[in-house]
Image (tube, rainbow, N blue to C red):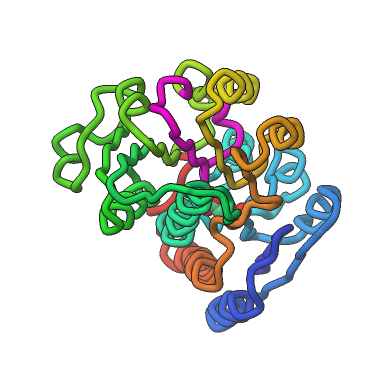
Amino acid sequence: MKVLLATQKPFSAAAVAGIEDILTKAGHSLVKLEKYADQSELVAAVADVQALIIRSDKVTAEVLDAAPEMKIVVRAGAGFDNVDLEAATAHGVVVMNTPGQNSNAVAELAIAMMIFMSRGQFTPATGSEIMGKTLGVQAYGNVGRLVGRKAEALGLKIMAIDPFIPADKIRELGAEPAENLEHMYASSDFVSIHIPATPQTVRSIGYDLITRMPKGACLVNTARKEVIDEEGLMRALEDRPDLKYVADVAPDNYEALREKFGVRVFATPKKMGAQTAEANMNAGLAAASQIVDYFETGNTRFQVNR
Ligand code: 3PG
């Protein structure tokens, strides 16, 4: 089979070599489309491939329409909001992700961001320590749990909430279950967001939740910019000069936020949570192995469009 690796934000050379090795040893061939500038390049590149590995690259209905031989798309990473699942299903294309493979990288970034913001973005002004503070983790999946464990080791108290994990399981995993979102925001010096972008979650975090946070609190978003109601965030930061916001990646109104609130806000220019050598390798190799396994055995364990 011909497999396309389409990555606007490329994997490390070592990860790409590993992907190629796995695929070629199994009798497949790899073609690459890296750092492409326009979506039309992806549309053209899928014409004769049977499998596709992507990161946050957009697999739209147009891409799938242009890929008559496509059998499988693997999102090398966790979030698959960049893939039109309905269109993929309509085309008979299996879509998978590689859950957990880049979680540690994202969790480390979330912790780093908490310290960065507590120290005034490394300016000499007097900052604060994170030890002894409370961290609320919104969604206690692969990334959220790692953030919780790392933060606990740094002396924070962990609270968590997850619509799919019962309170006793959250307690078993070492965190105090929040009664509801309002309770968690009101109790947390930091809230770290780990929810996917879905029709239910988009713009779900706004003025009401953010302004419940205690004095000096910081909202940490390494999930998706879309889950924030940006207008509500702006109003919250205006009304509460003690609050902070840090994100991977920049909200649409970042320039205005930065101008108004200076070091109280920070956002990465490009999504970098999963951009480590280790995460590139883990997610990339997992994606290649899943494709090999799918063609060999029909394994659909990580399929997300059932
Ligand atoms: C994910 O959903 O896995 C992360 O957001 C990483 O995305 P990326 O592969 O585009 O860096």
Q: Of 151 and 52, which appears nearest the observer? A: 151
Name the side, left or right, on which 184 lies relative to 243: left
> Is residue 221 covered in magenta?
yes
Q: Which is the main secondary structure of the residues drawn in magenta? A: loop
Residue sitting at 59 percent across and 47 percent down?
248
| Residue 99 in which image quadrant | bottom left
Q: Of 237 and 137, which appears nearest the observer? A: 237
Residue sitting at 34 percent across and 37 percent down?
136
Residue 253 vs 270, above or below: the answer is above
| Residue 250 in which image quadrant | top right
Residue 71 visible in the snapshot: no
Point out residue 43 in the picture as x, y percentages from the top left corner.
80, 50
Point out residue 149 in the picture as x, y percentages from the top left corner.
28, 55
Quarter the C terminus occupies: top left
> Number of labelled discs?
0
Point out residue 64 in the picture as x, y percentages from the top left corner.
70, 44
Quarter the N terminus occupies: bottom right
Residue 163 visible in the snapshot: yes
Residue sitting at 27 percent across and 37 percent down?
159
> Is residue 166 covered in magenta?
no
Report the span colored magenta: 210-229
Name the side, left or right, on which 187 lies relative to 5: left
Name the side, left or right, on which 141 lies relative to 284: left
Q: Of 61 and 179, which appears nearest the observer? A: 179
Point out residue 228 in the picture as x, y percentages from the top left corner.
56, 29
Residue sitting at 69 percent across and 54 percent down?
69
Name the side, left or right, on which 262 lies relative to 45: left
